[in-house]
Image (cartoon, grey):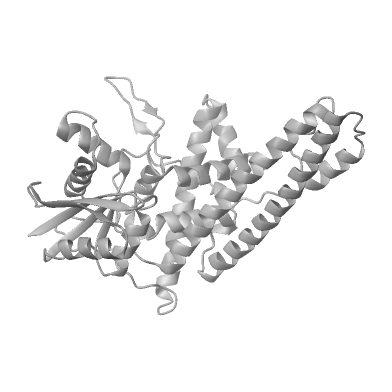
């Protein structure tokens, strides 16, 4: 009998609930995440011969425990927090949260959803994920620093500085400012400090991009050849997607990343609405990719313009473009992984994604109704930005 070990993780503790195939709780408990606590929790789980660990938020708070379990040879699947929250509401009749209730909801979600992702321990992908997170943090910090510079310059220069401002341009502006009072002197000094910080951040971003580019190239990925995908976006796609073959079709990939619209038809009215589910980080990557293509004369821009000509709103046309870009990314990632696997030892980690649980199929994720097949036209992702 296969049991599901649902886990509600936190930084310093984890609550587990072990259920049988009927959903009945067999064992539960709360354990520390230090070495003694983790060992005790693992011992309890290994008391059952056939077991699967269902961990909530393996890309977030549950990542550290999920990776430790995989390293110790355990089968781990990722349960999205939204899915377990829905199960909690339906199973309890209310939205009350306690750690034992959350752990039980995670286990039930894993029991009833057959297409959840299995976690694998690919060191290269883990490293890419960590670096992608760091690169995103640097990007946010840079935006905050530039905003502070703009706010200070608005008091020193009538109308402020231009929108897209570099550290070098800000220093040039300061040379034209004469501080005539104590307030202006302090403001000017603060701008200089913020510019110094901006230069440091820019240097770290450049170094992070260089490292990411090297790792992505060494892995054999050609994602950066697509128009609008840089090192950080490519790293995010590789790290969060993992095994692209777990998505049986590009429709399921689009559903997972939130670019497949949801069917909202009623009666004779046929319509779709925007999906706000899916992996929002990957959705952001595709959004940035679309925006970059719209700024240049690309096939993606031409596709967007055609959608506008047939009566689509700007947002509807953008959503349609993001869906086509999702298809292009999927095709490229499948080709890259097939080539990597064909290369044999050294080109593939060899980690399987097959689960030992009857009814589990971690090669595909749950799919909302996908968007109809797009018109066969040029690939918008391969157009040049020149």
Q: Is residue 376 visible?
A: no
x then y, percent, for residue 229? 58, 52
Say if residue 47 shows up in the picture: yes
Height in image: 169 above or below 58? above
Q: How many numbered discs, if any?
A: 0
Residue projecting furthest to the front: 182
Give me the residue at 27% from left, 65% from top: 36
11 vs 210, nearest the viewer: 11
Quarter of the image with the N terminus is bottom left
Q: Position of residue 178 (x, y in %)?
A: 92, 33
Q: Is residue 344 left or right of residue 32?
A: right
270 vs 172: above or below:
above
| Residue 86 placement, left or right of 247 | left
Q: Is residue 288 left or right of residue 189?
A: left
Residue at 59%, 33% (x, y): give it: 305
Q: In this view of the protein, which residue sits in the foreground, 165 or 346?
A: 165
Residue 310, x across and y down, in percent: 53, 27
| Residue lying at the far bottom of the rendered structure | 345
Q: Position of residue 162 (x, y in %)?
A: 78, 34
Residue 84 falls in which quadrant of the image? top left
What residue is at 18 percent from the left and 65 percent from the top?
43
Which of 91 and 245 lies nearest the eye of the viewer? Answer: 91
């Amino acid at each position: 009998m296969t049991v599901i070990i649902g886990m509600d993780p936190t930084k310093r503790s984890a609550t587990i609930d072990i259920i049988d195939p009927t959903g009945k709780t067999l064992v539960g408990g709360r354990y520390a995440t230090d070495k003694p606590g983790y060992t005790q929790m693992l011992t309890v789980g290994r008391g059952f011969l056939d077991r699967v660990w269902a961990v909530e938020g393996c890309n977030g708070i549950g990542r550290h425990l999920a990776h430790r379990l995989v390293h110790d040879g355990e089968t781990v699947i990722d349960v999205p927090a939204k899915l377990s929250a829905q199960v909690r509401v339906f199973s309890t009749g209310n939205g009350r949260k306690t750690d034992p209730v959350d752990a039980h909801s995670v286990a039930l979600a894993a029991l009833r959803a057959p297409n959840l992702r299995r976690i694998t321990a690919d060191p290269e992908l883990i490293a890419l994920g960590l670096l992608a997170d760091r690169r995103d943090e640097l990007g946010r910090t840079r935006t905050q620093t530039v905003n502070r510079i703009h706010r200070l310059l608005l008091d020193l220069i009538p109308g402020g500085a231009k929108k897209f401002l570099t550290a070098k341009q800000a220093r040039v502006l300061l040379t034209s400012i004469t501080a005539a009072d104590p307030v202006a002197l302090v403001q000017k000094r603060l701008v200089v400090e913020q510019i110094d910080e901006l230069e440091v951040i820019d240097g770290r971003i450049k170094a992070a991009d260089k490292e990411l580019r090297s790792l992505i190239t060494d892995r054999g990925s050609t994602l950066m050849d697509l128009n609008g995908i840089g090192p950080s976006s490519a790293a995010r796609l590789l790290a969060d997607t993992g095994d692209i073959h777990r998505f049986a079709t590009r429709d399921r990939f689009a559903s997972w990343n939130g670019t497949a619209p949801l069917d909202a038809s009623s009666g004779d009215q046929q319509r779709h609405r925007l999906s706000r589910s899916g992996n929002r980080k990957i959705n952001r990557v595709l959004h940035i990719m679309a925006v970059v293509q719209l700024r240049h004369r690309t096939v993606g821009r031409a596709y967007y313009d055609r959608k506008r000509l047939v009566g689509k709103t700007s947002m509807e046309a953008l959503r349609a473009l993001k869906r086509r870009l999702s298809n292009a990314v999927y095709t490229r990632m499948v080709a890259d992984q097939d080539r990597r696997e064909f290369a044999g030892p050294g080109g593939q980690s060899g980690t399987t994604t097959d689960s030992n649980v009857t009814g589990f199929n971690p090669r595909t994720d749950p799919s909302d109704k996908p968007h109809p097949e797009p018109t066969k036209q040029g690939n918008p992702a391969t157009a040049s930005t020149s």
